C-alpha cells in the first residue's frame, strides 16, 4: 500500500503548520517540513517543540533563506526531500504541498489512486511551445542569467537583464535536455525523487544552469522528471487543483467553493483562504474520515466554470473598436442582415429558410463555429479568432464571393461588440433577434456543450449555475434592445404570426407573402 511523505515548504503561521502536520499524519502518512530560514527563530522553536515527538514528522536538516522566483525554493525542496527519504524508508511517494493546500479527497481515496497507477503525477509540458506562461517573461527565464530577485531588487533585476540583452549574452539550454514547465505542486514516486537527486550530484552543470534561471521551481523537476522517466509513466497534470487568473495570480478559494472543489479530480486544492473557517473545517474532517463518504460526482470542470463566470461582464461588452479595426469597411451600398439567436439551431434554420425563399446568400455563426456554411475562401477564414479580429474584411470577402450586395449572417447575441462594429460601418446593418424561451433542459445542454457541466455534475453545482446562465441570456437580449441600433427587429414563438411576418418584412424588405411564408415555417423555433 502506498505511503505518502508530504514535502511542506512554509514560512509563517506555526499554529497552522502544526495542525496541518497532525492532520496529514493522522491517516498513516508522514511529512518533512522546511521552514524558511528568513523566519524568526521563535516560530521554528515552536514547531519543533510541538512536532518533534511525532515519529511521522521530520525537518529539513538545513534551512534555506527562500525568495519567490529563486533557486532557493528548489534547494529547500531538495533539503526536505532528502530528509523525507532518510527518515521514512517505507514512503512510496513524495507529495509537494504548501500551507495553503488542503485535501479535497479522503486519504483512502488518495492512497487507492496511487496504488492503482504506478506513475509520477507532475505537470510537465513543453516550455517554448505550450503557452503555459500567461504573463511576463517567457524564454528570458532561461536564456539569461538572473542574479537578483525581481521582487527584492527590481531595478537591479531589470538592469541586469537589459545589460545581457545589449551585450548578446544569451545562453543555450543544456544539451540533451528538453525544457519543460508546469505546476510546482507534484506527487512523485520515491525512485523518481532519488533519481533526480542522484542526477544532480552527477551533473553539477545542470544545477548551475537552473540556479541562475528565473522561477526554477516551475521548470527544474518538470524537466528532469521528463528526462529521467519514460513518458508512459508520467501523468502530466498536477495532483493539486489550482486556478490562475488572467493576470497570472492564483485564485483563492472560500467557504462557498466547497462543492466546486469536491467535484474536481484532484487530491488537494490550493489556495484555501485563511479566513475560510468553514471550508477548512469540512476539508479537515474529510481527509481523516473513518467512514469514507461516497465520492462526490466528479466533473473536473472547475477551470472552465471559473473562466466562464469571471468572463461575464467583460466578454462581448466592449463598445469602442480598437484602432487597427477602423481601416476595414464593408462599403456603402451594401446591406448586412444579422440574424441573432442564442439557440444556434434556430438561427441557422431561419437563415436557411430566408435563403430558400429569397435566394439571399447566408452563413451560419461564422464568429462562433468552425463550420459556418462559408464559401471556399482559400483557407483565409479557417481561424475563428482571426475572423473576429478582421470581421469587416471577412464579411466583405463573402460579399465579393457571392457577387451580392445583400448578405445574411448569424451572430450570437452576446457578441454585441461585433454587432455594434458592423452598425458603425458605411453599409446598412439590420439586426433580427429571434427571442426564444430557455427551459432548464436547454440550459443544462448548453452548459454541457460549453464544458461547464458534465452529465455527472453535482445537483448543487447545476442548481447554482443554471440561474446564472438564464440571467446572462436574458441580459444579452435586453442589451440588444437597448443598444440604440438603427434597424432592430425581434420575432419569437410567443408573438402572433402576423406580427412576426411584419417584422420579417421590414427586416428583409420583401413582399408580405414572402415574409409570411418564412414566419410560418414549421418547427422554426424547435431545438
Image (cartoon, grey):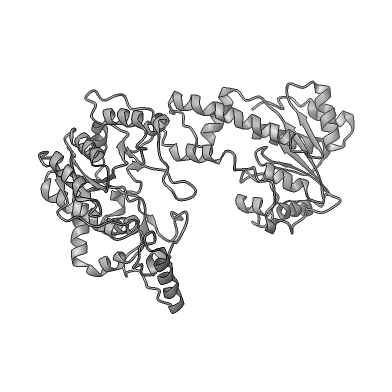
Residue 204 lies left or right of residue 253; in this view the side is left
Q: Please name whichever residue, 479 or 236, is drawn nearer the observer in this view of the structure.
A: 479
Residue 521 lies, in percent from the top left, at 76, 27
Residue 156 seen in render: yes
Relative to 119, residue 453 above or below:
above
Q: Residue at x 74, y 59 (%)?
A: 327
Q: How many labels were placed on the picture?
A: 0
Residue 155 lies left or right of residue 390; in this view the side is left
Q: Residue furthest bottom?
A: 167
Q: Residue at x 60, y 29 (%)?
A: 471
Q: Residue furthest right?
A: 511
Quadrant housing the C terminus:
top right
Residue 214 lies, in percent from the top left, at 36, 62
Q: Please name whichever residue, 273 or 503, is drawn nearer the observer in this view of the structure.
A: 273
Q: Residue at x 61, y 46 (%)?
A: 370
Quadrant hosting residue 201: bottom left
Residue 122 lies left or right of residue 190; in this view the side is right
Quadrant hosting residue 492: top right
Quadrant housing the N terminus:
top left
Residue 416 lies, in percent from the top left, at 68, 41
Relative to 137, residue 449 above or below:
above
Q: Residue at x 14, y 44 (%)?
A: 48
Residue 341 seen in render: no
Residue 255 lies left or right of residue 434; in this view the side is left
Amino acid at each position: 500500500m502506498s505511503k505518502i511523505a508530504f514535502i511542506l515548504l512554509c514560512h509563517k503561521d506555526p499554529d497552522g503548520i502544526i495542525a496541518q502536520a497532525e492532520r496529514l499524519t493522522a491517516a498513516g502518512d508522514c511529512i518533512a517540513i522546511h521552514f524558511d530560514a528568513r523566519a524568526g527563530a521563535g516560530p521554528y522553536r515552536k514547531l519543533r517543540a510541538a512536532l518533534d515527538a511525532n515519529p511521522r514528522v521530520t525537518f529539513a536538516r538545513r534551512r534555506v533563506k527562500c525568495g519567490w522566483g529563486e533557486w532557493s525554493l528548489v534547494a529547500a525542496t531538495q533539503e526536505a526531500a532528502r530528509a523525507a527519504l532518510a527518515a521514512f524508508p517505507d514512503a512510496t511517494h513524495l507529495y509537494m504541498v504548501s500551507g495553503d493546500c488542503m485535501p479535497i479527497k479522503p486519504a483512502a481515496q488518495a492512497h487507492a489512486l496511487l496504488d492503482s497507477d504506478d506513475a509520477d503525477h507532475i505537470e510537465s509540458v513543453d516550455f517554448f511551445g505550450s503557452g503555459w506562461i500567461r504573463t511576463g517573461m517567457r524564454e528570458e527565464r532561461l536564456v539569461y542569467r538572473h542574479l537578483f530577485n525581481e521582487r527584492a531588487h527590481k531595478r537591479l533585476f531589470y538592469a541586469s537583464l537589459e545589460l545581457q540583452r545589449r551585450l548578446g549574452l544569451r545562453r543555450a539550454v543544456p544539451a540533451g535536455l528538453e525544457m519543460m514547465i508546469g505546476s510546482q505542486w507534484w506527487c512523485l514516486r520515491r525512485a523518481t525523487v532519488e533519481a533526480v537527486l542522484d542526477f544532480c550530484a552527477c551533473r553539477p552543470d545542470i544545477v548551475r544552469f537552473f540556479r541562475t534561471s528565473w522561477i526554477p521551481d516551475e521548470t527544474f523537476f518538470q524537466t528532469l522528471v521528463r528526462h529521467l522517466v519514460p513518458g508512459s509513466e508520467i501523468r502530466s497534470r498536477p495532483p493539486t487543483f489550482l486556478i490562475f487568473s488572467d493576470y497570472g495570480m492564483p485564485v483563492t478559494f472560500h467557504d462557498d467553493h466547497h462543492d466546486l472543489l469536491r467535484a474536481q479530480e484532484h487530491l488537494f486544492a490550493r489556495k484555501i483562504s485563511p479566513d475560510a473557517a468553514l471550508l477548512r473545517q469540512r476539508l479537515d474532517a474529510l481527509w481523516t474520515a473513518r467512514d469514507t463518504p461516497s465520492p462526490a460526482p466528479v466533473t473536473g470542470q472547475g477551470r472552465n466554470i471559473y473562466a466562464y463566470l469571471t468572463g461575464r461582464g467583460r466578454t462581448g461588452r466592449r463598445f469602442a473598436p480598437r484602432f487597427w479595426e477602423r481601416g476595414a469597411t464593408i462599403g456603402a451600398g451594401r446591406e448586412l442582415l444579422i440574424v441573432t439567436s442564442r439557440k444556434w439551431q434556430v438561427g441557422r434554420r431561419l437563415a436557411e429558410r430566408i435563403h430558400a425563399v429569397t435566394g439571399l446568400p447566408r452563413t451560419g455563426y461564422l464568429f462562433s463555429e468552425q463550420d459556418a456554411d462559408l464559401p471556399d475562401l482559400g483557407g483565409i477564414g479557417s481561424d475563428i479568432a482571426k475572423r473576429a479580429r478582421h470581421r469587416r474584411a471577412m464579411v466583405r470577402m463573402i460579399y465579393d464571393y457571392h457577387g451580392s450586395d445583400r448578405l445574411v449572417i448569424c451572430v450570437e447575441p452576446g457578441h454585441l461588440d461585433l454587432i455594434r462594429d458592423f452598425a458603425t460601418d458605411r453599409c446598412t446593418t439590420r439586426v433580427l433577434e429571434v427571442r426564444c424561451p430557455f427551459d432548464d433542459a436547454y440550459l443544462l445542454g448548453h452548459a454541457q456543450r460549453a464544458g461547464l457541466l458534465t452529465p455527472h455534475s453535482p445537483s448543487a453545482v447545476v442548481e447554482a449555475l443554471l440561474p446564472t446562465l438564464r440571467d446572462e441570456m436574458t441580459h444579452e437580449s435586453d442589451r440588444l434592445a437597448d443598444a440604440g441600433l438603427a434597424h432592430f427587429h425581434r420575432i419569437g414563438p410567443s408573438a402572433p404570426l402576423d406580427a412576426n411576418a411584419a417584422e420579417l418584412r421590414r427586416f428583409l424588405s420583401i413582399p408580405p407573402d414572402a415574409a409570411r411564408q418564412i414566419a410560418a415555417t414549421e418547427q422554426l423555433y424547435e431545438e
